[in-house]
Image: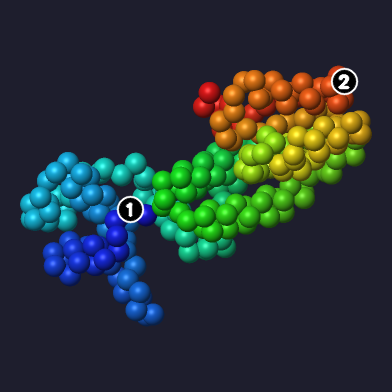
Amino acid sequence: MTGIPSHAIRKWQERYRILKPLQAPNGYWRYTNEDYFVLKSIQQRLADHQRLQEIMNMGREKLLEDNVSDLSENQIEFLNLVQSHSYSHIEKQFNKRATGTFSSWVNRVIRPSVILVGKAWETGILSVPEEHGYSKWLQSYLFQKVQVFPAASKAGWLCVSFPGDGHELSSLMHYSILRSRGIPAWFCGMLPREILTREVQTGKYRGVAISVVLDQTKPKLDSVQRAVEQASPGIQVRFGGYAIKVA
């Protein structure tokens, strides 16, 4: 999670006793959230060209005062659950916070977790299998949640990801919110452009909601919108997602 080589962490622990890991029955060392903050402080001070011995002489409590990490303790605990594939614990947390409307719960609880896991993968805190494992579990979890809402029975919205963008959770969250509001919707994840245009030609949909997670140029967005509108004249096309909000 810190990017510090494991052999360096072990050496610091043996020589300076600056960390306080707990040894599990299987022999593995389990580091605490405080250990994470200590390591981030050491890492930052080394990057500022401070000598290792000087840093260690400061002591654990002083290093904890640096607060150099951009992750909160709750976020670290959540990422620890993702790393250990403790999805049952994550489900309990999500269910416990399922207050208010379904859409507010998705925006307040589910969406931030998706963004956090995505950023953790980008920065190397989570591996590809860990990030993908969480994404697949969350897909199953959300599909189960929306089953309490009426299924689509008439023309509605087709929820997809931008062609070529494999990040499907954003479109799935939008689909879930539409279902919770009684708006007919179907979820297809990512469809290649030619298959998307062929699908809307069936006339089953009054609109297409396209989620954009990876940065796309305006000409590419306009090109996809024109292709969909030409395939089904009068259809509505709406773009949303993380990249659109950032832009």
In the image, taking residue 18 as reference, residue 242 lies left or right, namely right
Residue 102 position within the rendered picture, expressed as x and y whole percent measured from the top left = 66, 40
Q: Residue at x 16, y 56 (%)?
A: 60
- Sequence-first disc among 1 and 2: 1
In the image, taking residue 125 as reference, residue 146 lies left or right, namely right
Taking the image as drawn, is residue 176 in sight? no
- Residue 2: assigned label: 1
Q: Residue at x 54, y 44 (%)?
A: 114
Q: Is residue 9 above or below residue 116?
A: below
Q: Tell me which colouring the rendered structure shows.
A: rainbow
- Residue 233: assigned label: 2
Taking the image as drawn, is residue 61 in sight? yes
How many residues crowd around disc 2 within 10 Å: few (fewer than 14), some, or many (20 or more)?
Answer: few
Q: Between marks 1 and 2, how big is the CA–CA gap? A: 52 Å
Question: Amino acid type of disc 2?
Answer: Pro
Q: Foreground: 198 or 138?
A: 198
Question: Amino acid type of disc 1?
Answer: Thr
Q: Residue at x 63, y 55 (%)?
A: 136
Q: Secondary structure at mark 2?
A: loop
Where residue 101 sits, quadrant-wise, is top right
Q: Secondary structure at mark 1?
A: loop
Q: Residue at x 86, y 35 (%)?
A: 198
Where residue 219 sits, quadrant-wise, is top right
Residue 55 position within the rendered picture, expressed as x and y whole percent measured from the top left = 12, 52
Q: Is residue 193 above or below residue 54?
A: above
